[in-house]
Image (tube, rainbow, N blue to C red):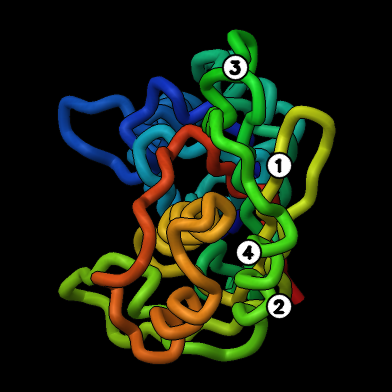
Amino acid sequence: MPNYRLLVEFDGTDFHGWQYQPDQRTVQGELEQAASIFFHQAIRLHPAGRTDSGVHARGMVANFKTDQLADCERLKKALNGISDRDVIIHEVAIVDDDFHSRWTATAREYCYRIAKTRTAINRNFTYYVKDELDLIAMNRAAQCLPGSHNFRGFSLAIAKEKHYLCRVYFARWNEYGDEIHFTIKANRFLHGMVRILVGSCIQVGKGLMSIKRFEDVLHHQNNRKAGFKAPAHGLCLEKVYYD
């Protein structure tokens, strides 16, 4: 039974997130419909992660199995032809039977983009912050994130979450012209984690939160002291890593 792996890019502006929802337009629903039309049977996609409504992706990975063998290039063209223009399949490959987009992934990398000036063209992909931000202080806060930590303080609780331990490989802020980017790579991410980290770092950059308080949220898992949850449209899943 062939196991197909897809490399997916999408603009999350008009999607209600990745996960299928009845009567809502989602990335999973769009791609499953396209694949089902091609194979003439119901297809279920398994993603590397579930993005919230409004979040974008350059490097989402998903896989599915079917009993039909298809040419990968033909399948890619068909999926792109059936799907709307705000979701694109860049690669289709047949992979080992035990490959699973989520469970065999070793890390994910996200980028959050902040605009220092108002923008019309990039308004759906950057979060405009009019206040001056102290990038040095924001990076000092981010420096305490690498390593294995309990990120309960920087995430939203959900009933099915078994634990809040994540291993962060790097987290940093960089300035690129009129934009500031927060890039973070970890083995896993919790619900709302990146956006709450960004909101907390913004508070640090504005001088509204001390670095000590930021560290206390991390070490004592007290999310009531964390910053706000940054808007979804500034966030993009950049890459999923596999061995």
User: Relative to the observer, which residue lies in front, 205 or 200?
Assistant: 205
Query: Which is more N-terminal, label 3 or label 2?
Result: 3
Q: Is residue 78 above or below residue 196?
A: above
Residue identifier under label 3: 118
Label annotation for residue 180: 1
* Residues under numbered marks 1 and 2 in contact, where contact means CB atoms less than 8 Å apart: no
Horizontal side, residue 69 vs residue 149: left or right: right
Amino acid carrying label 3: it is Arg
User: Relative to the observer, which residue lies in front, 9 or 45?
Assistant: 9
Residue 65 seen anywhere in this rendered image of the structure: no
Query: Which is more N-terminal, label 4 or label 2?
Result: 4
Q: How far across and how far down the image is residue 157, in percent?
A: 23, 71
Structural crowding at the residue carrying mark 2, measured as other residues with C-alpha within 10 Å and reported as few (<14), some (14–19) or many (≥20): some
Label annotation for residue 169: 2
Query: Which is more N-terminal, label 3 or label 1?
Result: 3
Q: Secondary structure at mark 4?
A: strand
Which dot, 4 or 3, sits closer to the camera? Answer: 3
Query: Which is more N-terminal, label 3 or label 4?
Result: 4
At horizontal 47% and vertical 39% (from top left) the residue drawn is: 55
Amino acid carrying label 4: it is Arg
Mark pair 4, 1: CA separation: 20 Å
